[in-house]
Structure formats: C-alpha cells, structure tokens
Image (cartoon, grey):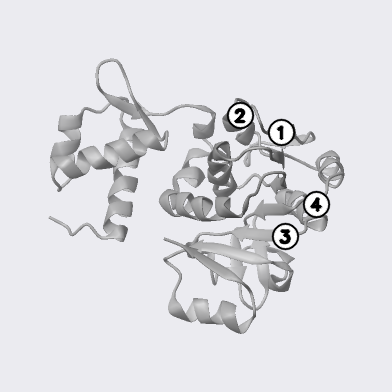
Amino acid sequence: MAKNTKENIDNRRKELLAYVARNPSVTIDELFDKFDTSSVTIRRDINQLLAENLIKKNLNGEFTLNHDPAFDVNYFKRYSMHHLEKVLIAKKAIELVQPGHVLGIDSSTTALELAKQLISKEGITVITNSLFIPHYLTLHSSLTLFCVGGQVNMSNVSTEGFTSCQEISNYNYDISFFSADALDFETGLSNYDVGSINTTLAFLKNSARKVLLLDSSKIQTKASRKFLPLSDIDLVITDSGISEVQTEEFSRLNIPLEIAF
C-alpha cells in the first residue's frame, strides 16, 4: 500500500475523479476494489471530492461526476488538471481580500477556485469576464457582482474582445487576480490563447495590486504569445511543488512570492 504523501494523495484523487468521469455511476465497493488503499482512505477521498463539488452522490448511493456548469465537457480537463494545487492557491489568495475591496478576476480555472472562496467575504465588489464565476456568487447577498459583456470565447467560457476590454477598463481595482499558461524567468508570462490576453491586460491596467495565481507546473515553461514581463507582477502565489532553485530565482528578481501548502 502506497504511503499517503501529499503527492500520492493528490495523484490518487485525480485517478479517482478520472475513474468516476469515465463511468456513469460508481459504487463505494467498486472504488474499494479499484484502488490499492484502505476503505477509510477511499471514504476520506470521496468526502473531499464531494466537499469540492467535483462529484455527487445519487439516490442509489452511487457516485457520479458533478455536471454543474463548471463541468462543461470542453472545460473539464483543464479544470481538473492540478485541481488540488489550485484550491490551495485560492485559499492562500483569499487572505488578501478585505471588506470594501473591488476585485478583478479573470476567467482562468485557478481564479474560479478563488471565486468559490469569496462566499466567506463580506462587502466586496467583483468584476469578471468568466461565465462560470457568477454561478457560484449570485446567492452571496452582500457581494456586488458585475459580469462583463462581449463576444463569448467558447474554449475559455468567457467574454472577450473590444467590448469586454472597454467594460473592464471602466473600473479601478484594489486587486486583480489572474493566471497565465506559462511563466519563464527571462521572457515573462505567456498564453496560448491570444483572445484572453487583452482582457487580462485590461484588468491589470487599472489595478493597484496585480496578483498572479499560478500552479507550479507552469513555472519555467513558455507558451506561444508573450504578454507581461515579470516586473509588472506585485505578487505570485503558487503551490509547494515549486523547486528551491525556482524559489531562489523569484527572490533574485525581487518578485514577491507566497507558497500555498
């Protein structure tokens, strides 16, 4: 039986989630047989995935993928990749949010995890171009939510283009939370999707604090389109998968870094 290290727990839960995604309905006994671990451990994993709304339990006691709007078939793979790291990053980022803050939040999957955490905050204003984030925030009575209009980007499930950028630019932000597809210490941030770059830059233009939410797998990688030098970032929040060498490089470049555990 594998030792329950953080990496093993993470990998097992990803495999469990993928297994449920591939099968219409799964019983707890089936999961006991499938995974080489104790029934107590599997129950703990299941309870965690239920708590994160990744799966749900039907009336027959079987587990299925949670097909709420955050599980669109074209979005699920990107959403579930490094999901636990994104949750930890979001929990660290939420500590920055204070009552009265005006927040800009982009359409990244890490930002979606942050949005879920915002239900614990009072008296804040959120502006977002994500079409998923409103699903989690519309019942928050003390939160003011603005959904940015514009052309819908189907792959990102967001609004983008000239209209979106114009609306985003009408606000002053205390903090803008954003992500990127890749971070390279020499060339800066880059994305594969060109359309998302302009909306992200529109958020950052009028932001007092620019906070990058980035899981460690994206550090020291490059995507096709550069869009922001690292010197423009006020804070990077990543997970504990970051290497000591990478941590030292952030320090050398004088870029504030927080690691979520």
Q: Amino acid at mark 2?
A: His
Counting residues from the N terminus, which is met first, the one under dot 4 or under dot 1?
Answer: 1
| Nearest the eye: 80 or 148 | 148
Callouts 1 and 3 close, C-beta under 8 Å: no
**Residue 78 located left or right of residue 192:** left
Residue at x 16%, y 41% (from the top left corner): 40
Is residue 107 left or right of 21 when viewed as pictured?
right
Along the polypeptide, which appears first: circle 3 or circle 2?
A: 2
Mark 2 against mark 4, which lies toward the viewer? 2
Q: Nearer the viewer, mark 2 or mark 1?
A: 2
Q: CA distance from mark 4 to mark 1?
A: 18 Å
Task: Give the residue number, with chain letter if any, for mark 2.
Answer: 140
Quarter of the image that includes the C terminus: bottom left
Residue that label 1 marks: 145
Question: Does 35 sit above or below residue 151?
Answer: below
- Residue 86 is situated, as x and y percent measured from the top left of the image, at 48, 52
- Distance from Cα at disc 2 to Cα at disc 4: 26 Å
Vertical side of 260 occupied by 69: above or below:
above
Which percent across, then down, holds residue 234?
69, 66
Q: Secondary structure at mark 4?
A: helix
Which residue is disc 3 drawn over? Answer: 209
Residue 202: mark: 4
Q: Label 4 neighbourhood size at 10 Å, few (<14), some (14-19), many (20+)?
A: many
Residue drawn at x 63%, y 42% is 156
Q: Are marks 2 and 1 in contact (CB under 8 Å)?
A: yes
Dot 4 or dot 3: first in sequence order is 4
Q: Amino acid at mark 3?
A: Arg
Q: Earlier in the sequence, mark 2 or mark 4?
A: 2
Mark 2 / mark 1, whichever is N-terminal: 2
Amino acid carrying mark 1 in the image: Leu
| Image-based side of 132 in relation to 209, left or right | left
